[in-house]
Amino acid sequence: MFLCLLSFFLLMMLFIIFFFWGSMLLFMNLFILLEWNLINFNSVNLSMMILLDFISMYFVSLVMFISSMIFLYSVGYMSHDKFIDRFYYLMILFIISMILMILSPNLITILLGWDGLGLISYCLVIYYQNFNSLKSGMVTIMINRIGDIGILMSLFLILFFGSFNMVFNFNNKLLIFLILLAIFTKSAQIPFSSWLPMAMSAPTPVSCLVHSSTLVTSGVYLMIRFNFSISNSSINWMILLLSMMTMVYFGVVANYEFDLKKIIALSTLSQLGLMMIILCLGNIKIGFYHLFIHAVFKSLLFMCSGMLIHLMMNFQDIRYMGGFIKFCPNLVMIFVVANFALMGIPFFSGFYSKDLILESVLFNKFNLVIMYMIYFSIGLTVCYSIRLIYYILIHNFNFLNFYFIKEDKIMLMSMMFLVFLSIFCGSLFGWLLNLNISVNFLSNKFKFMISFILLVGVLVGMMVSNFFYIFNQVKKIKSIINKMFLLNYLVFMNFNLFLNSSMKFYMNMEKGWMEIIEGKNFIKVFIKMNNFNELIYYLLFMFIYLFLFMFIYLLYY
């Protein structure tokens, strides 16, 4: 516990320092590029580069702030854990890998941080040593390995440019595709989305830090860094289409899910799709603005869910919960604030970034189908948020007695900082970033469309919560939606096909014909050769004796 408290104070100090540096660089319109030349090999320079600008400084400060809150939260949540020291060291290693990835535009350094994030996140997912955690960890590391291969192959390809630094504009389609492969696997975009809901088997403090504000947003951060190459490429439309599919797809799935942490994870996937869409339009500042705000209220949501699960003796099904407003008013108030920020209710922090994104969508060259699908996904966000609030606040309590329900003061203390930011972060950070948004003149029907979608989402969310039996009539459709439209089967079908084909090849060839032709036959030949050598040895020995006998006979006679 002492290590967690010490880390809380140290990380809080680092947050203040990095945030101050980022503000200074932003106000001075300055960036600092530090480079150390390590190796010169022909025309290739291997150098260590650090890029200090307001984006990197603010993102590092965000990681420091949320990490400090997580360590304070872990004092209460992980108090009875026997391996708290192992958890602490893994979290510190994860933060170091994240900072290494953020501060350097060099692909080699990015690969080191990227691999560190993947390996340590795997160790954190399997922290609880059971079969479910092991299965989730294997899915997580297998899908993330695909992105690592993308960065590794881009390292070989970038040798043609004579530098590993991605601060320059490389208009190579294959290189951009490989970088996008890494971005999509880490940000869990379709078709690489199945690992994030399964990674919720990790401890809740891990989900707060790793699966809401740092690991999954590292792909979005890489998209921001390489946006000058990606936004002008011909595959920009493919990114837009897959991001839109991710938003709608997991918005629908979240409305049929009953696992509390999985609902929040699915909402994270939907918001990541929204960030990728605005980055496809080239609005880097608005994308970073929404990333910053989303990290704050999504960490708060995971903290609230962790405390609810802690009070419910590790039950995560929202159908067992309900009536928490009667005996946990502080926790419920924080939970509602975080959900309002997620929905974009005026004037919570999520409203500022979402309103800017939706107005930017209206002023771009989209067809009506894409525009309406984006607005439909926003309505789905409101729908599953209202459904979640209903089950936690109003629904009947269906689990044992109330005697064990007691709010943890340390957990609540760590949440209070994030509650303040969930309310005021949107206006404060928007003023600080100085977004320089041009005035958008919209007609009344478009201006009130967002409010109309919020209202419809609230009504549909109440209908789904109260009259859920209407939506359960077609059992097969409900089963398919609960399985994420069979995404896991579609993704791992190719893996299973490869593994099964390799097993058949092994059984038929290695254990079959090749064993007979090469293995056993080679042993027989070796035995025959050994016998032949022995025969030659005996014959030679007899010949030598015969020669000596003849020599002695001729010598005396």
Image (spheres, rainbow, N blue to C red):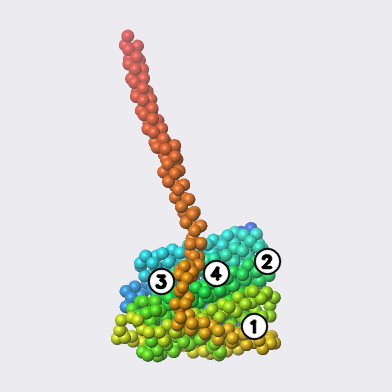
Residue 158, image x and y in percent?
Answer: 62, 62
Q: Would you say the residues marked 1 and 4 are in contact, meaning their CB atoms lie under 8 Å apart?
A: no
Q: Indicate left or right for 519 with 240 as reference.
A: left
- Checking the image for residue 234, the label placed there is 2
Q: Indicate left or right for 316 with 57 as reference.
A: left
The quadrant where residue 42 appears: bottom right
Residue under pointer 3: 201
Structural crowding at the residue carrying mark 4, measured as other residues with C-alpha within 10 Å and reported as few (<14), some (14–19) or many (≥20) = many
The quadrant where residue 397 appears: bottom left
* Residue 209 appearing in the image: no
N-terminal of the pair, mark 4 or mark 3, is 4
**What is the CA distance from the residue labelled 2 to the residue labelled 4?**
19 Å
**What is the CA distance from the residue labelled 2 to the residue labelled 1?**
24 Å
SS type, badge 1: helix
N-terminal of the pair, mark 2 or mark 4, is 4
* Residue 463 appearing in the image: yes
**Can you say which quadrant of the picture contains the C terminus?**
top left
Which is nearer the eye, 298 or 329? 329
Structural crowding at the residue carrying mark 2, measured as other residues with C-alpha within 10 Å and reported as few (<14), some (14–19) or many (≥20) = few
Q: How many marks?
A: 4
**What is the CA distance from the residue labelled 4 to the residue labelled 3?**
20 Å
N-terminal of the pair, mark 1 or mark 4, is 4
